[in-house]
Structure formats: structure tokens, C-alpha cells
Amino acid sequence: MEIIEKSVMKPVIAAEISARLRRFGDTEKARFLQRFFKAGPGEYAEGDRFIGLKVPQVRQLLSEYRGVTPTDALHLLMSPIHEERLFALLALVRCFEKGDEGIREQVYTLYLANTNHINNWDLVDISAPQIVGGFLLERDRGPLDLLARSESLWERRIAIMATFAFIRQNRFDDTLAIARLLLHDRQDLIHKAVGWMLREVGKRVPAVEEGFLREHCRVMPRTMLRYAIEKFPEEKRRMYLKGEC
């Protein structure tokens, strides 16, 4: 009887959260977000739908629902509404960070089984380092290689963003390896993410980033290079942009 009650309650919790999120929606803001996140016809997030909430509003509501489980979150992750998927991913991050090994594995497995719903750059960036990177921190990194070779733009972004967890531990090999795999990616969102992670490496050990740049700066996509060298002194930036590396 207890199991039946729990299975009935979970969709109810998700429906309650969904109703509360939609109550605070803002039509004007939704139109802006639709444009900002490139959800129009032919754009990378075509079909994504927004109700017009800021991230702090979503986080505030999350703070009121301390008991959200991975299964609860899954119901919201499957929503067509962007902010509901954002709520779901923030909830999964919290479950992962506060959970034991069993919960962490459950969240990681659920996450990778539902990457088709993690389909915009902000959704990837607020969850991949914590969940995928966090789970693989002391494990085999083979799943990152598979993600980096995926046809899915979002899975490739998950691969490079997950390595942020390693960078924070001053472990750079996986970031550099994934960056090499993505060096000739055609998607601007991948160029930005790789450049960003290279810049994060350089914040910690400049010589490691510059070693990578000297090897690849002449063939790197321009956006990737610009993101990687964003914090360099102006003279050094110009040198790299001219290919004098």
C-alpha cells in the first residue's frame, strides 16, 4: 500500500510545482527568453517554450520543496516548458550533492538517459559539472569520450562542461582531451564552451592552457580562441589572434 501511495504522489508533487511556476510567468519576459535562447524556427533550440521566469525565481521555489526526489524531478524534466526543466535539473543537482552513493548513481543514470530533455546551454551548464563531472571524478572517464563524439550538440556540450568538476580539482588532462576531440566542431555553442573551459584551466595553471594554445591556436575556431584568451593581456591576445603562437 505504501508503494502505491508514493507512486501516486510523485506526479501530484510535479503538477503542484508546475502550477506554481506557471503562476509567476511573465509573457513579455517569455518572448525575450524565446529570442535569447534561440528557440525560433531553424535555431538550435527550436521548439523550446518559456513562461518568463528568472533563475532566482526558480531557485526560490526549489528552496520550498526540500523533499523533491529524482523521480519527482523526472516528471518535470520531461516538460516542454524550459523553466520546469530548469527546476528539475536544479533539483537533481541538489539530490546528487546531498545523496549517498546509491542516490548519486541514480541521478547520474537518470541524467544520461534523458539528455534529449537537457536541450539548451543553460540547462547543461547548471547541471553537467555537478552531476556528470561529480560522478566521474573518481571513475573511468570513458563516458565523456562517447558524449564528445555524439551527434547531439547538447551531449557534446555536456562532455566538455562536465570537465569543470575536474578543473576545480586541478586535473586538466580530460579537459584537454575533450577539447582536442571538439577542436573542429561546427557548432558555435561548442566553441564557446571549449574556450571557456580552457580559460578556466589557464586561471589555475597558465602554462597548461598556453601549451594547448601554442599547439592548436592556428586551427582553432575563432570563437573558441577568443573565449580561451579573453583574460590575456592585450598584447598577448593580439599575438594569438594573429596566429603568432
Image: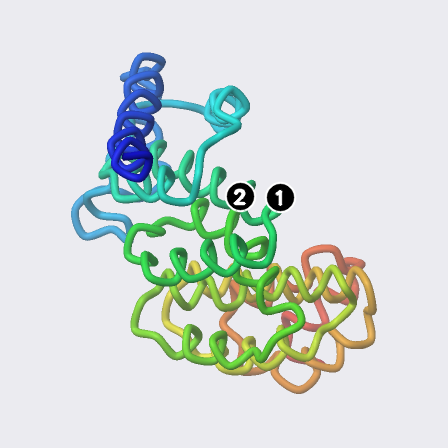
| Dot 2 amino acid type | Cys
Find residue 98 and name its label: 1
Whether pointer 1 and pointer 2 mark residues with C-beta atoms closer than 8 Å, the reply is yes
In the rendered image, residue 30, in percent from the top left (x then y), is placed at: 30, 24
* Residue type (three-letter) at the residue carrying disc 1: Lys
* Label disc, if present, on residue 45 of the rendered structure: none
Which residue corresponds to the image point at 82% horizontal and 75% vertical from the top-left? 207
Q: Secondary structure at mark 2?
A: helix
What x and y, as percent, mark residue 64?
51, 19
Tell me the quarter of the picture where residue 225 sits: bottom right
The residue sitting at the bottom extreme is 215
- Along the line of sight, the residue nearer the viewer: 202 or 166: 166
Quarter of the figure that contains the N terminus: top left
- Which residue occupies the extreme front position in the image? 1
- Which residue corresponds to mark 2? 95
Crowd around label 1: few <14 · some 14–19 · many ≥20 (10 Å): few
User: What is the x, y in percent for residue 125?
Assistant: 51, 50
Q: Residue at x 45, y 57 (%)?
A: 106
| Residue 21 in the figure: left or right of residue 42 | right
> From this viewpoint, is residue 90 visible?
yes
What residue lies at 63% left-to-right and 70% top-to-bottom? 241
Quadrant in the picture for the C terminus: bottom right
